[in-house]
Amino acid sequence: MVFSSILFMFIYLPVVLALYYLSPLKWRCIVLFVVNLIFYGWGEPIYVSLMIFSTVVDYVHGMLVEKYRANDRLARKIVLSSVLINLGLLFFFKYIDFFIANLALIQAFSSLKPLGVSLPIGISFYTFQTMSYTIDVYRNDAPVQKNILKFGDYVSLFPQLIAGPIVRYKDVAEQLNEREHSVEKFASGVRRFIVGLAKKVLLANNIGMLWDVYKVMPAEELTTLGAWLGIIAFSFQIYFDFSGYSDMAIGLGRMIGFEFLENFNYPYISKSITEFWRRWHISLGTWFREYVYIPLGGNRKGTLRTFLNIFIVWAITGFWHGASWNYLLWGIYYAILLMIEKAFLLDWLKKAPAIVSHLYTLVLVVIGWALFAIEDLGSCITYISAMLGGGAGFTNSTVSYYFMGYLPSLIIMAFASTPLGVKLLNRLPVKSRQIAIPVLIAFTLLISTAYLVDATYNPFLYFRF
């Protein structure tokens, strides 16, 4: 699917855009829907039917909510039906084998065998989107969509279909019916797409190779500094991989007239864990806040209830990322940190020197990435133990070799993780910017394309979620 996505972007995208813009306005809806299904079906044709099923189910549920709005009790049951069907699909395809494998550890269920169900790419994203539609219609946050093709476009919209950002229905409801197309918006989309492409192929891919070395390094060779170097590499990889894909999705959306909300806002400059999660994967955090945390009562029912709600939301958030215990522990890890900050630490961090609060945040986030990146719990504990001084010594020649080899990349990525580059560019005179930006974009596209043609290492981390 990774190869098919890259192939689609570079071979089919010009064809798709030409078809879209050459089509009469009244045909663009169906053209876009067909394009979306071809894009998704290129890698997994069997699961196109699953997406169509999900589309029809939630379209019908939205219509039923609108029809029986006056009967609130029945409308609530319809919403519940939509939620259960969507969660049922997600549970079966993403978690059924995990639960069977864990049940099989109990003697009474030892005969159970995993079903071998493969995970449809992007199911975690589009099931959350379709759930938001029915809920938004029920809440009167968005009008019911009576055109099933337009609703199908929302569910299967190819720019953000397989790795987000998660687009709530109410944020694009009006755009599905009418959106702006202009040369300026198209050009802005192209620039944003190229920036995201560069993040992915020039930064994430390169530093990811360093993480690949350390994540499989035997415990007897893993030093403390080596463990930190490896997980810092992963921290950069996952940021530039996912934010890069989000940039590409936002850029592609603009090319066909859509405006998606931002998904990242320089999270590594945060000075608290609370701030970090306002800047990282914004669409997921927003979804859980609006559709889980607030309905549970949010922070309106006292401190203990607030902490319980935080724990529930973050346990679910962790498990949403994958059917493995490490993701659940990762979610609980952040729940505990956020509760501590909410209880007393956040006030102290606001008064502390910026460097102290910033280092506190980065250290805890990087430790969290170790929990996230290593699914095997035994290996995960061993790795974190090495980070905390329990490794094979403090450092060795291998660490020095990789550190010096990757030092230029690490410096570039540290700089690119901040808004300094954008600020420096904006300080240039207008005429200089008008020359510099197109030249930089063209050069970036050339280098990124050359790298893609030559490279065999090109993982998209968030495809598996």
Image (cartoon, helix red, strand yellow):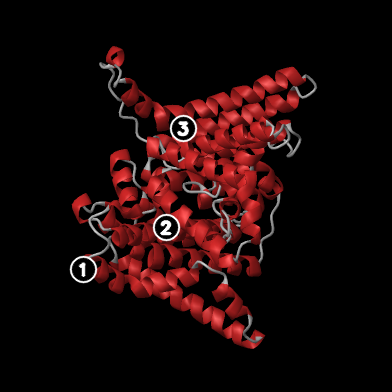
Q: Quadrant of residue 41?
A: top left
Location of the C terminus by quadrant is top left
Residue marked by disc 3: 50
Residue marked by disc 1: 397
Label 2 vs label 1: CA separation?
Answer: 23 Å
Element class at badge 1: helix
Whether residue 435 is visible to the viewer of this picture, yes or no, is yes
Mark 1 or mark 3: which comes first in sequence?
3
The answer to whether the residues at label 2 and label 1 have Cβ atoms under 8 Å apart is no
The answer to whether the residues at label 3 and label 2 have Cβ atoms under 8 Å apart is no
The answer to whether the residues at label 1 and label 3 have Cβ atoms under 8 Å apart is no
Mark 3 or mark 2: which comes first in sequence?
3
Give the mark count.
3
The x, y position of residue 101, in whole percent, is: 31, 25
Left-right relation of 91 to 230 = right
Local crowd size for mark 3, using a 10 Å CA cut-off: few (<14), some (14–19), many (≥20): some
Q: Quadrant of residue 33?
A: top right
Mark 2 or mark 1: which comes first in sequence?
2
Which amino acid lies under the numbered mark 1 shown in the image of this protein?
Ser
The x, y position of residue 92, in whole percent, is: 42, 27
Whether residue 15 is visible to the viewer of this picture, yes or no, is no
Query: Residue at (32%, 49%) from the top-left corner?
Result: 385
Element class at badge 3: helix
Residue marked by disc 2: 235
Left-right relation of 286 to 14 = right
Label 1 vs label 3: CA separation?
Answer: 52 Å
